[in-house]
Image (cartoon, rainbow, N blue to C red):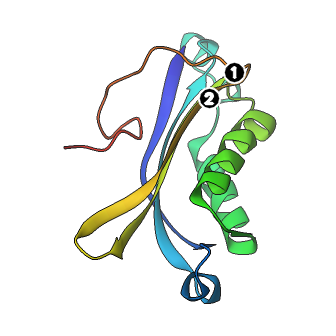
Amino acid sequence: MDFIFIEGMLVNANVGIFPRERTASQPLEINMTFGVPDDAALRDDIADTIGYDQVVERIRAVLAQRQFNLLETLGEFVVNLMFEEFAAPWVRVSISKPGVMKDVRRVGVYIERGRHGEIPAPLALPGALGVPRN
C-alpha cells in the first residue's frame, strides 16, 4: 500500500468541554497519513488516488460548521470521513491543541484504523505519519 501524508495542517475549530472552549474557536494541528491504491503510482493518474487538497478542504469545511466536545470524537469523525467519502483503506490521524496547558507544548489524540478494523505494523517515520518528532 502507498501512503499520502498531510503534516502540520493548521485549522481553527470549536473543540472542547470547558466554557472558554465552547465560546471561541481555537487552533488545532492535524497530521494524517492515509493509504491509497497502488494503481495511482502505476498508472500515474490522479483519478486513481486521493487528492490531498480535497481532504484538507473537506476537513476545514466541517470544522467551520461543527462543534466537537472531544478531540477523540473529532479524530474518529476524520477517520470515518476518509473511509466513507474518500475510500481510504487505512488512516492514521493525530490532532493536537498547541499551548493549552502551561509548560506543555501540546496535547492531543492519535487514532489509527484500517477500513476493516485491521491495523498494519507501525510505520515509524516521525512527523510524516502523525508521529511527533522528538
Residue type of the residue flagged with mark 2: Arg
Picture coordinates of residue 116, whole percent (x, y): 74, 19
Q: Residue at x 69, y 21 (%)?
A: 117
- Of helix, strand and loop, which one carries label 1? loop
Residue type of the residue flagged with mark 1: Gly
From the viewer's side, name the closer residue of 46 and 31.
31
Q: CA distance from mark 2 to mark 1?
A: 6 Å
Q: Residue at x 31, y 44 (%)?
A: 132
Res 69 quadrant in image:
bottom right
Q: Mark 1 — residue?
A: 117
Q: Is residue 94 above or below residue 33?
A: below
For label 1, the crowd category at 10 Å Cα-Cα, with few meaning under 14, some 14 to 19 and many 20 or more, is few
Q: Are marks 2 and 1 in contact (CB under 8 Å)?
A: yes
Count of picture labels: 2
Res 38 quadrant in image:
top right
From the viewer's side, name the closer residue of 11 and 24.
24
Q: Residue at x 39, y 60 (%)?
A: 107
Picture coordinates of residue 75, whole percent (x, y): 61, 49
- Of helix, strand and loop, which one carries label 2? strand
Which residue sits furthest left? 134
From the viewer's side, name the closer residue of 10 and 13.
13
Which residue sits furthest right? 84
For label 2, the crowd category at 10 Å Cα-Cα, with few meaning under 14, some 14 to 19 and many 20 or more, is some
Res 25 quadrant in image:
bottom right
Instruction: Tell me: 46 left or right of 108.
Output: right
Picture coordinates of residue 91, whole percent (x, y): 59, 32
Q: Mark 2 — residue?
A: 113
In the rendered image, the quadrant that contains the C terminus is: top left
Instruction: Tell me: 103 left or right of 30.
Output: left
Picture coordinates of residue 128, whole percent (x, y): 36, 37
